[in-house]
Amino acid sequence: MQRSTAFRRLLSAIALGSYCLPAQAQQNLEPRLLEYGFEQRVRTENWNNILDYDDGRADERRQIRYRSKLWMKSPVTSDIDVFVALNQETNQILVPDVPQRFDEVMVENAYVDFRKLFARRLSLRVGRQNLKRGEGFLLLDGSPGDGSRSTYFNAAVLGYSWGKSKLEAMAIHNPSNDRYLPRVHASTTRKLADRNEQALALYYTNDQVSNTSIDAYYFLKRETRDCRAATQHQYQADRHIHTAGGRLARRMQRGWSAASEFAAQWGREEPEKRIAAWGGYGYFRKAFARPGDPYVLTGYWGMSGDDPVTSTRYEGWDPLFARWPKWSDLYIYSYIREQGVGYWTNTWLWQIEAGYSPWKRMKTSFTCYDMNAFHPFNADPMSYSDGKHRGRQYQARGELNVNDHWRGHILYERHLPGSFHAGHSSGWFFRMEVIYSFRGKIPVQH
């Protein structure tokens, strides 16, 4: 409660201070625009056998998800904006039959954006905000427990820019449940994460070299008070973990491009377990100058796994703030009985992908993964076997952008389990999505 009050007071003080500018400064400001918008998303999702790959055990799901978002960005000065967004998502679960309940209305974003703070090159964004850096390998989703409803962080990001470079200092505090900002018709059982998460980070980006992007970063993260029982195999003791690494992306001649990222992790898990993990990837992409903009992509992705033989050392990759379906909307649920939903660890995979645009507003892609583990998972013999081959996965996706207001996609995935899983039945995932959105602007006199 004290943290929640302090956070709200901080936002109020910043907003109030932004409005209390000298009269002369406000007279010099030109009219700006108040922006607002609305988005309605409807998803139908059907899946089966993606928890255990066993036709004899029930895990089929059919559901419709209705998500509504309303947002506004209000100018305070020529260099300061306030952004607020509300979010509400209700799931209608048809199989298994679950009574429908109007879910909570929550504050998805509430931040103050200082694009120029004391100096032209210094900026600050403080409050509830969305964060993504690079390809989201470490930083994208701050609330994995609520699925795709939201991805926000409670954070402050201080940035300093020069030329085409930028250095950002970040402070993040994401409790396991939403307790900083008010909710309407609040859910008392929803967990946004399995534990309380706090982090400090430095993130550097450089685009000085033509056709080249360079990222370098360092994270210090604390994960405390796991909400699961200490007797469960998924329970994690309090830990602090350091992550340092970098990313390099390069566009080359004749439609070729490539990207690579690698990070190392070290730290300690209570009481005396040392952390030593790694994660990284590399891929090539070839775009063809032909009608339909066809392309092919191939790459390798790896996130280290914990060796059960080493009892005093933990080698499993910690995805930090990246528990989202980067590679698969199906397989994030297959991790539920390992480390938790979307917890990408103990995994390496080869990817082959091809894409084509039949016409300007439509894109299609077809992807195949060969998925493996570094070590078998022995904690749940009902769901996992003694092998290391997770299986092969096939994806087909079609996206359609009708106009500035309507868009949607269709996604189908099928996973053929390997020796890593105890079940031998194929799993599948199917989704259709339609989104309607609009945005407007109102001139504002300061």
Image (spheres, rainbow, N blue to C red):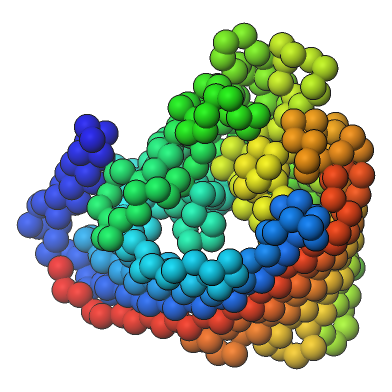
Residue 189, percent across and down?
A: 40, 48
Q: Nearer the viewer, residue 332 or 16?
A: 332
Vertical position of residue 7 compared to residue 316: above or below: below
> Measuring 78% from the left and 83% from the top, which residue is drawn there?
357
Residue extending farthest to the front is 56
Q: Is residue 279 visible?
A: no
> Measuring 80% from the left and 60% from the top, which residue is drawn there?
55
Q: Nearer the viewer, residue 391 or 152?
A: 391
- In this rendering, position of residue 65 left or right of residue 418: left
Which quarter of the figure has residue 253?
A: bottom right
Residue 431, percent across and down?
A: 66, 74
Residue 358, percent across and down?
A: 80, 88
Which quarter of the figure has residue 217?
A: top right
Q: Is residue 382 visible?
A: yes
Residue extending farthest to the left is 23
Residue extending farthest to the top is 272
Which quadrant of the rendered structure holds the N terminus? top left
- In this rendering, position of residue 307 left or right of residue 439: right
- In this rendering, position of residue 160 left or right of residue 281: left
